Amino acid sequence: MPDRPSYSDEELARFFEERAAHGTIGAAGTIGEATRDVQPPDGDGARGTAPRPHGPARPGDPRPVTPTSVETRTETLLKRGGIAVGVLALLGLVFFLYLWSGIPSLEEIENPENLESTLVYSADGEELARYYLGENRTWVPVDSLPNHLIDALVATEDRRFFNHWGLDLYGLAVVLVKAPFEGVRGASTISQQLARNLYRIRKGGDPGIRGKLREMLTAIQIERNYTKREIIEMYFNTVTFSNNAFGVQAASRTYFNKDASQLDLGESAVLVGMQKATTFYNPVRNPGNAQRRRNVVLNQMVKYGYLEEGTYRALAPDSVRTDFQPYSHTDNMAPHFAEVLRLWMRDWAEANGYDIYRDGLQVYTTLDSRVQALAEAAVVEQMAKLQAVVDVDWSAADRYFSQSEDNYVRYVADNDVEPFAYYWDRFSDTYVDAFISETRRAQILRNAGFSRDDAIDSLRTDAVFMDSLRTEKTRLEAGMVVVDPTTGAVRAWVGGKNFVEDKFDHVMQAQRQPGSTFKPFAYAAAIDNGFSPYYALPDTGFTWRIPGQPAWRPRGGGGGGMKTLARGLATSNNTITARLTRELGPARVALYAQRMGVQSPIDAVPSVALGPSDVNLLEMTASYATLASGGIYRPPTFVAKITDRFGNTVAAFFPEDSGQEALSASSAYTVVDMMRGVVDYGTGRRINVKFGLGEYDLAGKTGTTQESADGWFIMMHPEMVVGAWVGWNDRRVSYRSDWWGQGAHNALYLVGDFTRRLSRADDPAIRLAKTRFREPPGYVEPIPLDMQYEDQWYDRTECRELTGENCDGPSGSEAGRPESGRIEW
């Protein structure tokens, strides 16, 4: 094969210059138009066709265009276009999956976090309390919502709601067309707004285009899985309002003090209108704005056929009227009870797999709102008077004394009284120093290096601190509870006189000595073990000695003579009760107390029947209910049932076999009959004398602890048992007057006032009936003994012979034993 000619760079450059000079090569190095008309000097090419030079192609030679090259280029473009489309589709799919991964699941849509609070109801259907964290929300079914509320929403927010599938494409198109002229305006459907609410609950929001796209996807998912009415229900239960109201039920309660089912047309329009701007259209803060927005909503209803024009014209001029009742945990009909119940519910929910702050539980309590209101009123009125008594009694060294609490109230009004000034001075170096040293402020100073005395001296100079401390320590407190003896249901619960001042509950949380209210357990044990109420014991002082224990000598009683058990109980005689306890044994008294309902630990000491062990008011009242119910103990119950948000009962608390026999029906009735004497002629007679309740069949017992620190009274009626306690949170503070320190003159007043109110109630459903305790079938009334010896003095020598003790007491005529009813010493 011959060698191909080679060309030098100079020859190539000269070649291109010549061609350029003749116009045969363009500026870009391509063959120009003149080339087509030049006949080459030789060669075998056809006219008009440039000969192919021998050797390799030279720079600038055009590539031939053939059908094959055209097809190859088209295929390449198609391939590249297909790849681009595929990549874009893949990216779109990835972006779609990314968006889809961020939308709520169906489970989250139906049960978003922290959606529903627990709602507590009274036995008569009134709302009692709500438990929630952050959001006050109560779920309400769509069937409970008035039609005009739904119509107002659809007419204002999404008039094609019942015709679209989540997105209003027509509305979106209109918005896009008008955007250049009117600016961007919203076209969100109700379903999109619901999706937005769920985002807020779920993640705190998802802003921007990404969030809007997710909102649209969620709206479509919602529409695919729920009916229109279910969407309406979810919407109204997830929308937010001002003043910590979440959902239409909470908003209705907050702004109009009514259930959402009771909203009228104007109120419905106000709440729907608030969704545009909850603060700007708040009917309490901005009533004028709320009225204008309400009328816009009503006009929309007219425009789309939901409302008559005449109705709109009649309503439009009216101002917005509200009954503003923002919910507070401290402001409900029974705040102390509500807090105790919350703690109980928290434990119950944890044990049963619920959350009281998000699961929308409904708790139906046994409290009756009407009875509760009367109990609250009685406590407030009587405690104000009793506080005046102790304020005056401890105000000065020279005492003012009266047996009428009303006189103390007038004395405070007419005189410059400094409450507890004398107490603060008298016990300055003892109790007051102790009060100061136990405060948190003192502990902070101690931690900073102050000695106890230096910390006390420093705080004594702080007038605000000392005034607050005195107010706290000298505030007289109270507790009262009402129990139905036939069921154990708690009907009223007043844990203190003011929840804001003192949140500590004095019904179940407080533990105090019950004093003489514990005595009926000893008498019940005696009667249930064959003793007669007419069994007599000597009313003389004695010393009880038990090997290995300090000797104990009861105080109270000891007036001499023989006293029956019935009289000893009615007059709250300590000596008779102590002698009876010695015969029974302290352990038996403690056993009966526990069988009848006392759950707190009881020390089986000689003084057990005089109430030295701490107990709470609820268990004591429930124990008396055991007597009133014929000897059947029923645990005090304050929750009837619990349901879930759909109304399904998840727990019930009144099984038929809930009661257990603590003592025989005959024994229980006999003790009740003995305790009638307390009210008829004994320490509790003021329940009749002062409060005019003599026509009712009542029985009860007063109680007073040492140093008059605690006053008790528990009263029984066939339909209810009422217990009350009055005292101070700190046992070092007590009554100055022994007279006012008795439970017969403080706690009894609370019970008496409440019972009188109940006897005069307008509502016959709660009015106290004049029923009587029924004798049990086959009951045999105890036969009275020959009582000629009762209250007579007897010789100390015979007392020694009978008891083996050196009896103290006045001497007098001899008294022998009763002929029947043998006394065992």
Image: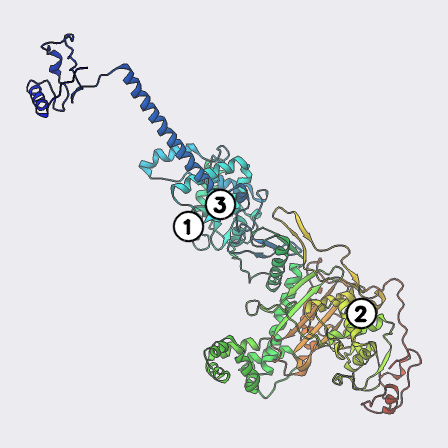
Q: Is tag 1's residue or tag 2's residue first in the polypeptide sequence?
A: 1
Q: Position of residue 150 (x, y in %)?
A: 52, 41
In the image, farthest residue toward the right = 819
Q: Position of residue 753 (x, y in %)?
A: 67, 69
Badge 2: residue crowd in 10 Å (few <14, some 14–19, many ≥20): many
Identify which residue, 86 or 430, lies in the foreground.
86
Q: Is residue 533 above or below residue 112?
A: below
The residue indicated by pointer 3 is: 198
Q: Which mark is residue 289?
A: 1
Q: Amino acid at mark 1?
A: Asn
Quarter the C terminus occupies: bottom right
Q: Is residue 773 visible in the rendered structure shown here?
A: yes
Identify which residue, 5 or 271, lies in the foreground.
5
Q: Is residue 458 above or below residue 8?
A: below
What separation in Å lies between label 1 and label 3 (alpha carbons)? 28 Å
Identify which residue, 675 or 100, lies in the foreground.
100
Q: Amino acid at mark 2?
A: Val
What separation in Å lies between label 2 and label 3 (alpha carbons)? 61 Å
Residue drawn at (63%, 80%), measured in percent from left and top? 734
Q: Which mark is residue 672?
A: 2
Q: Is tag 1's residue or tag 3's residue first in the polypeptide sequence?
A: 3
Residue drawn at (52%, 43%), measured in percent from left and top? 109
Badge 1: residue crowd in 10 Å (few <14, some 14–19, many ≥20): some
Mark in front: 2 vs 3: 3
Mark 3 lies on a secondary structure that is helix
Residue drawn at (65%, 74%), measured in percent from left and top? 726
Q: Is residue 375 above or below residue 142?
A: below
